[in-house]
Image (cartoon, grey):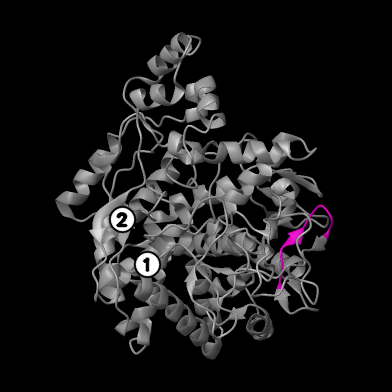
Amino acid sequence: MNQAGPAGTQRATRAAAAPAPDTLTPADRYEELFIAVQSNHVFSDSKSFVDCVPRIEPADILAAYRAQSPQPGFDLAAFVHAHFDVLEQAASDYVSVPGQPIAAHIDDLWAVLTRHPQAHPPQSSLLQLPHSYIVPGGRFRELYYWDSYFTLLGLLGEGRTQLMRDMLQNFAYLIDTYGHVPNGTRIYYLSRSQPPVFALMVELAQQRGVANEVDFLPQLRKEHAFWMKGSDGLAEGQAARRVVRLPGGALLNRYWDERDTPREESWIEDVTTAHSCQRDPAEIYRDIRAACESGWDFSTRWLRSPPPHGGQRTRPHVRASTAPSLSSICTTEILPVDLNAFLHKLESKIAALAQQAGDATGAREFAARADERKAAIQQYFWDPRHNAYFDYDWRRGELRDCLTAACVVPLFVGVAEPVQAQALAETVSRRLLAHGGLSTTECGSDQQWDQPNGWAALQWMAIRGLADYGHEALAGTIARRWLATVAAVYEREGKLVEKYAMRHVEHDDTEGGSGGEYPLQDGFGWTNGVTAALLAQQPRHTAHGCVAHSAAPQHR
């Protein structure tokens, strides 16, 4: 991989000198202390404890707990605060400037959200990285996988090529070290990944002259092997980890997690869900974790009985009064259209780079894999009755019935046929387009990856995918509406946020999104990246003249 002079050599040396990875999670390490802290709600957010930094050796902390906890009057919260540094979520030194245009605000935020290797605390759950990187913001204080592709879009617009190169090097390091890119750079995320977009990252870097994508061919092949592990010799109708072989022989992928225990960062929430139903807890935990690997955590997309599309579904602008229970979650029984589209992109990229590297055998192998996956995508995910791509329930042998914005990913990676793109554009315009941009799903609920929320990543993939197939008018409409949504919240509150509520009638107030397991976060990495990229593409949009009317602290 390309390095930039002496600084690049220093980074490579630092990476080589990094200690062997520690894969013991907080639950593994602290055992009954971990359970006591989470079950007794020492922190309001389960993620707080697993992100704490121990002040002494973890084994000594556990020994101290075992010695002291049986004593009368033992104070668990006091013990934790005496033995750990708690990383409280607090406002940073950066406060948005009243009167500052949104583009300048985003430009200032990159430094706020950048982290450096020397800042990684020892013996914490944070994974060591060799280079600088950008975090999303708020409670998300580590590097996240698929978020980062959309963050990179903004870095290119701002000319921060060295930081982009550093980010790519970090992802390559993670693949080399762990065999895959984890969900995020915490030990407790190592058992799962996220949507495989590393191929998109290196392609983006190649297009902008930041890196030579063929240099990353070994990591791309290793990532593919991670997703396909267990596929050799897999019988029809059987599944192994992230791979499912369907009747007829087609090989497709699902989301998965190597662990079947409560998520450590949401331990009490998962235990509560498991206690609320009669299912095997391990099965529920696996499905919850698999949904986290999708990045869509959570959505009716992964539930056994989501509201039907059509006349009986929740009206788009009305949110359900209660959150649908995760007790019916069945993520591992679903073949997601977006995951398989991303993997088609990965296989196509490996084929092209293998050819470029002189590996004709590898090029033929992966071209054939890509062709086979494309045929399976058309066979199993396209619904000619409703003119859209839907997820496929491989256990039941049928398409799911809730339309989601994941349907645009085949366009984004170029796997759709032009006639399908034309039909899908009409469906998206009719069923997912809102006054605020593109809706996440057609199903309304209090889960954050459902109606009424909209997310920057989905807007970008719809805009680019539609434009690439010649549907510039619809792409432009989504872009203009999304920018107006982001600008309206920035003008009123002086910040960019993780997700936004989609307006479905013109007079609705624009606001940040809601729902999910945690409060709305601001910062915010991928919103900044997509907004910066769209502003660069639309120099006449009124959002350029949008300024903050009030000062608002941005969370680090």
Residue at mark 2: 113
The quarter holding residue 538 reads: bottom left
Q: Which residue is mark 1?
A: 528
Q: Position of residue 489 (x, y in %)?
A: 41, 73
Using the rendered image of the protein, determine whether residue 130 is visible from the camera's viewpoint: yes
Residue at the spot 68% in from the left edge and 41% down from the top edge: 273
Q: Residue at x 38, y 67 (%)?
A: 496
Residue 302 within the magenta-colored segment of the rendering: no
Magenta stretch holds residue 391: yes
What span is in magenta? 389-397
Would residue 412 be found to the left or right of residue 313 on screen?
left
Mark 1 belongs to which amino acid?
Answer: Asn
Give yes or no for contact between labels 2 and 1 (Cβ–Cβ under 8 Å).
yes
Rendered position, 179 above or below 255: above
Q: Residues within 10 Å of mark 1 (few under 14, many from 20)?
A: many
Identify the disc placed on residue 142. none
Q: Write the residue at 53% across / 91% down.
A: 473
